[in-house]
Image (cartoon, rainbow, N blue to C red):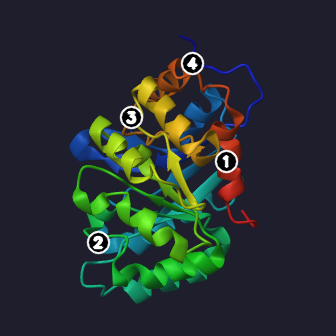
Amino acid sequence: MARRRNTGTTIIDCHVHIGSWPQWKLHLTLPELDEVMKEYRYAGAVVMPPLTDRKNVIRMNEALRREVQRRNDLYFFAWVHIKPDGSNEAEMLDYLKQNLHTISGLKLHSSISQMAISSKHLEGVLGFANKAHLPLLYHCGRNPISSALPVRDIAPTYPGVNFIIGHLGGNAYDRVVDTMRMFANGIPENVYFDTSTARHPRLLRRAVQLYGEERIVFGTDIPFTEMSMNWACLQYAGLADNANILGANFLRILPKSS
């Protein structure tokens, strides 16, 4: 099955991590991302820092932000990490405010931070994102604290935030299906789902049928997945030419200045 595209469809990967994880022998540099973008004919990609040092989250965000701030094909999503006691909440918020002009969105990984998205310590950040119309990519996984359920519940409170539920809601077959059940009775208009780590074409098709193609955005989570696997899943699901999923939906949910 061919990996390269021959059409002019705009492709934007909304879920890429730049950094190094020696404990897992994983890494992705900007030059390596450029090779992926060239091979798969990306028009752009969302990039996030690795957060391998939670004591220096500002430093890690800033290193990547400076590296990509002059590139108009990369969208920097700042990784929001608030300590469980909320002691760095003001510092995190100040950083976001000072660099708003070069931030396209936010990333939250509740299971790493051990802080639910509904926590009172995140109300300031979410309120800021709401006013600035910043999208927020939310990791979902097997840890209960990373469930998609609170996103469904709080999304109407922050209509200016387009919430992107990562990994279709769980990065595992049962979690994805459970997320489908959570949203079976309706989806807040500012909630979307990314395809990152999707590896079952039939399940991906089910998600598109339930949520609608206008609510799905293409993402990979590289280097934590193989790009060839992500692309093959799209192809087998019959979605490799879907302009909305591949890029148009993501461009619509970006803040106007991005």
Who comes first in sequence, dot 1 or dot 4? 4
Which residue in the structure is indicated by mark 3? 225
Q: CA distance from mark 1 to mark 4?
A: 22 Å
Q: Name the residue located 53 percent from the left edge and 10 percent from the top edge.
A: 1
Who comes first in sequence, dot 3 or dot 4? 4
Relative image position of residue 200 (x, y in whole percent): 40, 26
Q: Are marks 3 and 1 in contact (CB under 8 Å)?
A: no
Which of the two marks, 2 or 4, is nearer to us in this view? 2
Q: Is residue 41 left or right of residue 111?
A: right
Who comes first in sequence, dot 2 or dot 1? 2
Q: Quadrant of the C terminus?
A: bottom right
Q: Within 10 angstroms of label 4, few (less than 14), some, or many (20 or more) residues? A: some
Considering only vertical position in the picture, is 237 above or below 99? above
Name the kind of residue labelled 3 in the image: Thr
Which residue in the structure is indicated by mark 2? 115
Residues 26 and 128: in front is 128
Q: Within 10 angstroms of label 1, few (less than 14), some, or many (20 or more) residues? A: some
Who comes first in sequence, dot 2 or dot 3? 2
Relative image position of residue 210 (x, y in whole percent): 51, 40
Q: Name the residue located 54 percent from the left edge and 71 percent from the top edge.
A: 156
Which residue in the structure is indicated by mark 1? 249
Which residue in the structure is indicated by mark 4? 3
Who comes first in sequence, dot 2 or dot 4? 4
Residues 182 and 107: in front is 182
